Amino acid sequence: MEFEVSYDLDDEQQFWDELDDIVSAQCQTHGHIDDALRSYLSFTTNYKGEYLKNDYDIARCCFKLLESALFSSHQDYVRRQIVFSLLEEDSPDTLHLIVALLLFDGREHEATFELMNAEGIFPRLVEIIYEGKDDDAGLHRMLLELLYEMSRIQRLRIQDLILIEDDFIRYLFGIIEGLSDDSNDPYHYPTIRLILNEQYMVSTHDPGPDQPPTANLTNKVIKTLSTHGFAFKTFGENIILLLNRESETSLQLLILKLLYLLFTTPSTYEYFYTNDLRVLVDVMIRNLLDLPSSASALRHTYLRVLYPLLAHTQLKNPPHYKRDELLRLLAMMTATGGAMEVHFGAVDETTKRLVGRCIRVPWLKEYPGGGDGESAVAKKLLGVEMPGGMASSLSVVEVTTQKERPGVLTGSREREEEEQLGKARELEHEVAQITTDDGIRNHEDLSASVAEITLQEKKESL
């Protein structure tokens, strides 16, 4: 079966009709599938400039194939052929279609990203991004998205991470500096740098079962900010902005892990502007207050970052920002009994230890009315004497191993209270509906109805 034919199109509708014919081909052999895929890529590439002018057109073109019988009947084979095409193709227009297909398919089926990793696609993406930085902006943006998406759901191979050059990391940071102040711009968005930092941390401190720790693997994200951080300040501003508004747990953890390394690496202690650090303190206070009691792992990670933030950065210098508010927060987090325990839940030993570590920050130890000694502060805040063991060093392993699947949202006390209020209003409305045109039903019917609604509410809350 031969699909390599020329087309003479009169209008856009004819383009889409011809594309439907190509993806509707009945293919019984791998050879026929290969012919159909070549025809698809050749046809769409030839008319890309004329009929595929924006992201919507590209997406529509991709889903013509992804939703076709050709794809659904031979998914594994077609995916593998598209992946191999990415390794071999050099034409920017053809690469744009291939990258888009892999991105859209991978978002629905993670097996696509896993196949890409197994076939060594990561270095190829790095190569195309860096060498093709002057190519079509739409292709470049989509390459960055694909690199991010395939990296966020799995552990990359160490041999691939080793191949990343310093110039590539500096290039990624430079993209942010050279564009607008719109943090929603995909080029500006800092997540790809965060996910690379995550990959370095995992490979070094949390290797797989068949993989030894790689102490000699340099985290080139931290290295770049250590040596050239003065040139990449916008990135720092953006990750604080992102933490301020992010509700996805996995992204919060990505940010916190990078912050932890920045605040525990001497050469990056003062990477951030002081005003940005103050904003970060405000964000951390708010988030620690808002986290539900069930989010203990995320709360622990915030506390692990809070200590070096207060102890190592410019915040250690007068005037000490939000000192009283921080002390009140730490006291609330370790309170036992009463409203505070209801708010934060039972105080676990890890929380107590991490809070104790925070109050050892020198400028927090000078507690008004509590003496200058750290044990006095601990006793006032925690209600216990401060054991020497609470001064243990922060563990990068503990920070590294905190994980959450992409897409999982962090709970919020404020949202929970709004939901509870909404349920109460619904209950009130349902009770009000237990009326008739002639008036309220008899007392027994009303009581039974209210009891039934209340029982249903209890079941929903379990």
Image (cartoon, helix red, strand yellow):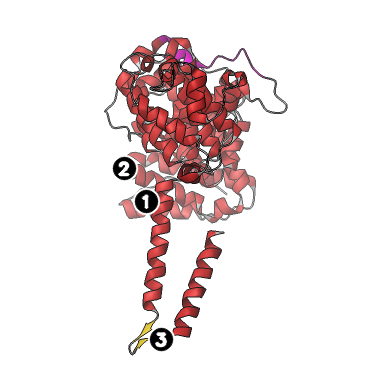
**Mark 3 burial class by Cα count in 10 Å: few <14, some 14-19, many 20+:** few
- Return the residue at label 3: 441
Up-down relation of residue 330 to residue 14 (above or below): above
**Mark 1 burial class by Cα count in 10 Å: few <14, some 14-19, many 20+:** some
Q: Return the mark for residue 354.
A: none
Query: Is 225 inside the magenta-drawn segment?
Result: yes
Residue closest to the eye, 301 or 408: 301
Point 55% across, 17% down: residue: 163
Do the residues under discs 3 and 2 have CB atoms within 8 angstroms?
A: no
Q: Nearer the viewer, mark 3 or mark 2?
A: 3
**Mark with earlier residue (2, 1):** 1
**Mark with earlier residue (3, 2):** 2
Point 39% across, 44% down: residue: 58
Point 62% across, 44% down: residue: 77
Amino acid type of the residue that numbered disc 3 sits on in the rendered structure = Arg
Question: Residue 166 in the image: x percent, y percent?
Answer: 47, 13
- Return the residue at label 1: 15
Q: Nearer the viewer, mark 3 or mark 1?
A: 3
Farthest-out residue, left: 180
Do the residues under discs 2 and 1 have CB atoms within 8 angstroms?
A: yes
Point 66% across, 19% down: residue: 213
Amino acid type of the residue that numbered disc 2 sits on in the rendered structure = Glu
Label 3 and label 2: CA atoms lie apart by 69 Å
**Mark with earlier residue (3, 1):** 1
Label 2 and label 1: CA atoms lie apart by 10 Å
Q: Is residue 101 left or right of residue 278?
A: right
Mark 1: secondary structure:
helix
- Return the residue at label 2: 50
